[in-house]
Image: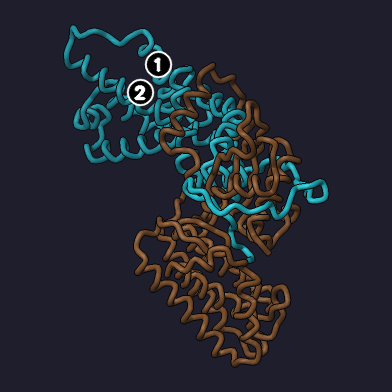
Chain colours: A cyan, B brown
Amino acid sequence: MPATLSQACLDGSVIAPAAPERCLGASRHVSVPSVGGTDALQAARLAAGDNHALAEVFDCLGPAVYGAALRVLGEGTAAQDVVQDVFVELWSHPGRYDPTAGNLRTYLIVLARHRAVDVVRSDLRRIARQERHHRLTPGQPHLSPCEEVTAAAVARVVRDAVRLLPDSQRRVVELAYFEGLTYREVALAAGIPEGTAKSRLRLALAKLESVLDRQLLETP
Amino acid sequence: MMTHGREPMALPPSGLRERVLEASLGARAAGHPVPEAAEISAAEAFSRAAEAFYGLLDALGDEDWRMPVLRDLDVQGLVGHLIGVEDHVHRCLSGDPEVAGANHIDSTQPAAACQAGRPCEQTRIEWRRAAERTIELVRAFGDPGTEVAVHGMRLPLRALLVVRAFELWTHDNDIRRAARLPSSVPDASTLALMTGLAARLLPYAAARAGLEEPVNVHLVLTGPGGGTWDLALGADPPDPASVCIVTDAVGFCRLVANRVAPADLDLHVTGDSCCAAKVLAAAATLALD
């Protein structure tokens, strides 16, 4: 019977015994190639639920992914969280990696950098919220030494980015964000209509966002 | 597109590997493919395979029915063989013990031979009715987990239906090969049932084939209908060898159907390749022709 599974024992039940029809002797030996895994093969194995493939990918690319996260974050604990996120993402959604679009190493490193930048952004927002809170409620405890270091580093990157703006836009950013003026106060100080102050700020922020994204992703 | 230079590597702290693997496997258990094929019943898998086979027969011209296909059978004889198999399945489902030990090929040879000289259309319709009768009897049978016995197999009805879907797909491709038509692939849901059954049967195939040395097989079948299985073959071992076999799901089914040699499969093996060769040869013995 072609293709019929014979003398089966399924679900633990014993079935009709049968004498071995073929014994594996030397004459029946077949050779099988031992082939190293390509990225496409690794992706196919991951999609098939092969946990060995996941371990192999970690062993091979884990150091590069950790290095990428560490480079953006500068701090081991947060970098480890990013590495975990990256591999959980790869294992949960292996189909999102397209082997025809690039190699797995690059895919994972880019993913790690993006996750790390998300962490930095989240930290920035938190620190900004805390700063605002401290300004409005004097006497509250200050930032921790670690947070102060992070905030100082981020502030340096932001100031460098602001310097790249055209003069008119840089002026309104400095007035609004470094001196804490409202739109109306910025307009008065710069001698421009309030609407112009708003549009210059919008343009400046869009440029800053693009520059800062690039810097955080590609910091040497 | 942004380019990235070689990222400097940093040695991950100890424990990170374990933590990452644990978190990943917590998010998705090992062995489960993604995307997972929609689950269907074994009866549905048989019904789909029968429909596909009938569609192929319907597309053949009269001269195609005379093409030699398998053993000494032409297409008409092969369909006759399948009519004989369906007849035995009907008897099995009706509780006839005589078909339990019948030889699959010898016992259906009269059904194959008697088709000679008949109009092809008549053979085609007869097979269609036989397959439809199988589906009716399965519906009336009740619990698909009930063991049935036919052609030397004793197995749950649902497994028998997967075996039958497997056989129809294989003969479908036998005919296609003879007619120089492109080969067909089962849908992912049917294929998942086929690969699951074949993987579960591998330890028994190895035992029947005389594979005595203990070996732990990590079997990875890629593509739709695939998955990953960890199978212990051979005697209960204190220290078994380990082998990882990766191939695509359809190729593995062709191997199990004895329609492709292990050497011709697109295989990726790690571990003892000699042992892997024996396991694959054992898989091919699951087919009986």
Q: Vertical placement of B110 versus B140: above or below? A: below
- With A32 as the anchor, is A163 left or right in this view? left
- With B263 as the anchor, is B186 left or right in this view? left
Mark 1 or mark 2: whose residue is earlier in sequence: 2
For the C terminus of chain B, the quadrant is bottom right
**Which residue has dot 1 on it?**
A150
Seen at 69% across and 43% down, the residue is B211
Seen at 45% across and 70% down, the residue is B47
* Residue at the left extreme, as displayed: A137
C-alpha gap between disc 1 and disc 2 = 9 Å
- Amino acid of disc 1: Thr
- With A186 as the anchor, is B44 left or right in this view? right
Residue A101 can be seen, yes or no:
no
- Crowding near pointer 2: few (<14 within 10 Å), some, many (20+)? some
- With B181 as the anchor, is A135 left or right in this view? left
* Residue at the right extreme, as displayed: A27
Image disc number at residue A123: 2
Whether the residues at callouts 1 and 2 have beta carbons within 8 Å, the answer is: yes
